[in-house]
Amino acid sequence: MANLFVILVSLVVALGGFVYGVDSGIIATTLGHDTFKYAMLGPTGVNAPLTGAIVSLYNVGQAIGTFAAGYLANKLSRRWTICISAIIAIIGGVLQTAAVNAGMMIAGRFFAGVGCGIMLTVVPIYIAEVSPADQRGMIVGLQGFMIAIGFFTANWIGYGGAYAKGDAQWRIPLAMQIPGPLALAVGCCFIPYSPRWLVQRERYQEAHNVLALIHGGCDDDIVEQDLAQIRAQIHADSSQVTSFKPAVTKLLSRQYLHRTLMACFILVMGQFSGSSVIQNYQSSFYAAVGFTGRTSLLISGIYGIMGVLGQVIYLFIAADRWPRTRTLWVGSLVLSVMIAICMALSAFYGSESTENISGARAAIAMIFLYSCAYAIFFNGTIWVVPSELFPFFLRSTGMGLAVFSKAVAAIVLSQITPTALENVGWRYYSLFIASNFVAAFIYFFLLPETGGKSLEEIAELFGDTLASDLPKNVKIEDPMAPKVKPDQESDAPGTFHMERTA
């Protein structure tokens, strides 16, 4: 079991997942309030393109936020970058709460998206870099757990809003987006820097102190060994570029393309699994089988409970016990089957005039089971694996590119979903059945297993050479270390003589 320090620090940072869950989830119930529809969508309360814009501009903000995430995480540290993202999310929440027209609402959604785009990039990186290798799946999975808690909270906040009067029905729920990032911004003042970022900045004693806390005060030799491996690997990579444009070029090079494509694919499939569409437009799905108004909002609240339940199962049963790759490909097949059943039920009973209430309830029950299964197999794992794939000097930019890809996928889906639901109805499910089925094969054949390995060792899976595996007596020079005469070389700070041990 991870020590209390690592758990507490990770929970503070994982508030970023909670912020994302609330910000993403609250729009689903907001769109279910008639008062919001008439205030923002016009006198008819129906405007599919504008509805898509309100949802998708949040994802546009996410995409843009990822461009700043990599630079800020390397320049200012992971810690303060997360703090900045929380402040941006607060601005977005304020604008949405005070919105007097659709333009102001869209601007608020955009700023909230920028903040969450940065969070989604940097939070899993930070947690991965402060987690012991054998517990990283569970600890990074805390972000997925907090996302599920955020969705759950948003659904019940939206349900509670139904008992308010007038515009308060949606303004009060939207205001509930503010406490989460406020707590995160304050919490960032009390957490340590990432030890790997400290090593990059040559603040070795601080890195040693943080690693000692991470290892729970164990033998100092273990801390020194861990520090030596991190320091050697980062110095070995020190000649590599870290600015945005060269880093993207490197990510798309033959050496790193496999990792880049897998990280992007995993997060894109978080959208094309169908989860975001069902979450954001669940009120439309419930209306299609005859449930509207408060009943629809109540069902949304119960739906949120299933995600939390599934995430608890993941943390205490699956994380770091099930192989990462198997979790993803088996989960993809499970979701494909569940959506196929839901599609069939919607085809037969997907009408407000249906007389078979049991069939309608069965369709909703399948959506609930889908939510639970998604949380078990994906909600944590899709953040764990991408955060592990890249070397330090590409980690923040690579994760940013993956989150950017996710945001682009979300933009596409949020724009086409309202129109698709109006025109093809239950047939729209077939897109997600096919995408999950294809994903299972890609995970099975192309994704190496990363569980239980240090972030430095994972590079070996993709053909990189570890600094600790270099031939005997090969020196790894710190380019920032002062130059000395040859007879003083053995005492030069920042110089390592790595020897292969049996």
Image (cartoon, rainbow, N blue to C red):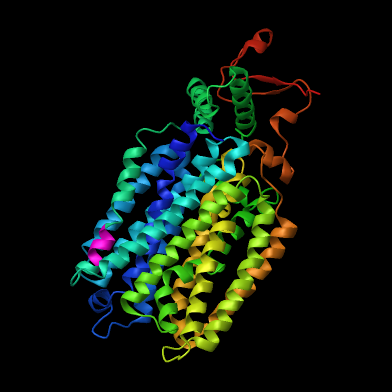
The residue drawn where x is 23% and y is 62% is 172
Task: Quadrant for residue 470, please give it.
Answer: top right
User: Where in the figure is residue 173, as x and y percent of width and height?
Assistant: 27, 62
Question: Which segment is the magenta one?
Answer: 170-175
Can residue 419 be seen in this snapshot? yes
User: Where in the figure is residue 493, as x and y percent of width and height?
Assistant: 59, 16
Count the labels in the image: 0
Single out the residue that lies furthest toward the front.
358
Left/right placement of residue 436 relative to residue 128 reads right
Q: Is residue 356 magenta?
A: no
The residue drawn where x is 66% and y is 12% is 489
The residue drawn where x is 70% and y is 62% is 442
Q: In which quadrant is the C terminus drawn?
A: top right
The residue drawn where x is 60% and y is 20% is 224
Q: In which quadrant is the N terminus drawn?
A: top right
Quick check: 389 above or below 219? below
Single out the residue that lies furthest toward the right.
502
Left/right placement of residue 378 relative to residue 411 reads right
Task: Quadrant for residue 344, please give it.
Answer: bottom right
488, 48: nearer the viewer: 48
User: Where in the figure is residue 316, as x and y percent of width and height?
Assistant: 56, 47
Can residue 54 be seen in this snapshot? no
442, 360: nearer the viewer: 360
User: Where in the figure is residue 182, as x and y percent of width and height?
Assistant: 30, 46
Please tell me whether the stretch drawn in magenta is mainly helix, strand or loop.
helix
Left/right placement of residue 133 relative to residue 64 reads right
407, 313: nearer the viewer: 313
Task: Quadrant for residue 101, please give it.
Answer: bottom left
